[in-house]
């Protein structure tokens, strides 16, 4: 699938304020990724690079948990800078990660809930390997095939995701030792199907790339709301599935 990176940037920039309040699952995912890093990575990570820092969920966790001298932060749009303090040791790398030059001699490259937008993951893994010091760390959260499975089932559209097995193969091929990989199913509950669409819009997802129908009208919305009733729980809520995959790997060659 060809992704419209300009549209993705526009949607996330538009949702930058509502994202902070509504990205509940993303905050949980960042917290768990940081927890895994604490179990495997050294406390001193002097030079880190973060892909898709967004509003700083993972960044702030890392600053609180690790000794970081310089954080190179990447995202698609300049507006993310408003979420960070001027006195923090940050250097900005704004733009599409697939076309940016990466900083070198890094102790760690991290990313949470962002690299699902990358179209050429094998190439990115190779570039990360080159940018990391020997024994440098690659710590990621991304998503698996069941992410937003309810939306995909009803609309027939959604992103393509690597499986755990795909990650194992590609990481090894790129010169990484996989220290930890795990996956979760996070079930979020909403009062109505309409609230689910509002949640997706508030987190910048709706309208980026076919995660929902690109052009809703009154009839298609009514049909979507009706069909979503199959995902209603016994207590009357409506579920939306997040399927995070967590990766802790280390450069070995």
Image (cartoon, rainbow, N blue to C red):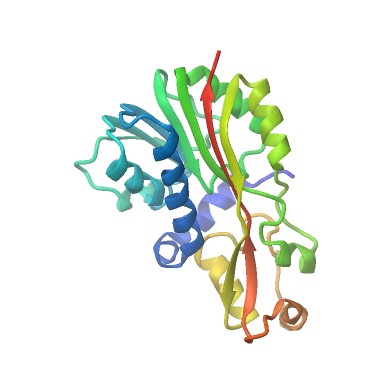
Quadrant for the C terminus in the image: top right
Is residue 180 shown above or below 47?
below
Q: Position of residue 251 (x, y in %)?
A: 52, 21
| Tally of numbered tags | 0
Q: Position of residue 241 (x, y in %)?
A: 64, 64
Judged left or right of residue 218, residue 140 is left
Q: Position of residue 165 (x, y in %)?
A: 72, 37
Quadrant for the N terminus in the image: top right
Residue at 58 percent across and 75 percent down: it is: 189
Is residue 244 shown above or below 173?
below
In the current view of this chain or complex, which residue is farthest to the left?
87
Q: Nearer the viewer, residue 125 or 85?
A: 125
In the current view of this chain or complex, which residue is farthest to the top?
253
Does residue 121 appear in the picture of this structure? yes
Residue at 34 percent across and 47 percent down: it is: 61
Does residue 120 appear in the picture of this structure? no
Residue at 80 percent across and 62 percent down: it is: 156
Q: Nearer the viewer, residue 31 or 24?
A: 31
Judged left or right of residue 148, residue 246 is left
Residue at 78 percent across and 69 percent down: it is: 154
Residue 115, picture quadrant: top right
In the current view of this chain or complex, which residue is farthest to the front?
39
Judged left or right of residue 4, residue 250 is left
Is residue 132 shown above or below 196?
above
Q: Position of residue 96 (x, y in %)?
A: 53, 37
């Amino acid at each position: 699938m060809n992704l419209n990176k300009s549209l993705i940037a526009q949607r996330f920039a538009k949702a930058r304020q509502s994202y902070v309040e509504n990205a509940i699952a993303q905050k949980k995912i960042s917290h768990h990724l940081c927890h895994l890093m604490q179990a495997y990575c050294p406390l001193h990570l002097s030079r880190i690079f973060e892909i898709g820092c967004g509003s700083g969920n993972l960044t702030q966790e890392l600053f609180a948990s690790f000794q970081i001298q310089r954080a190179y932060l990447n995202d698609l749009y300049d507006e993310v800078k408003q979420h960070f303090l001027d006195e923090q040791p940050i250097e900005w790398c704004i733009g599409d990660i697939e076309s940016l030059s990466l900083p070198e001699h890094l102790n760690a490259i991290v990313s949470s809930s962002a690299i699902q937008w990358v179209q050429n993951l094998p190439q990115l893994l190779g570039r990360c390997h080159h940018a990391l010091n020997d024994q440098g760390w690659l710590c990621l959260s991304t998503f698996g095939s069941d992410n937003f499975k309810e939306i995909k089932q009803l609309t027939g559209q959604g992103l393509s995701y690597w499986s755990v097995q795909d990650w194992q193969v590609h990481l090894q091929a790129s010169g990484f030792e996989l220290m930890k990989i795990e996956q979760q199913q996070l079930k979020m509950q909403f009062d109505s199907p309409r609230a689910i669409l509002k949640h997706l819009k508030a987190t910048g997802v709706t309208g980026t790339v076919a995660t929902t129908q690109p052009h809703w009208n009154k009839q298609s919305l009514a049909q979507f709301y009706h069909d979503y009733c199959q995902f209603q729980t016994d207590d009357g809520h409506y579920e939306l599935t997040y399927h995070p995959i967590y990766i802790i790997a280390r450069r070995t060659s």
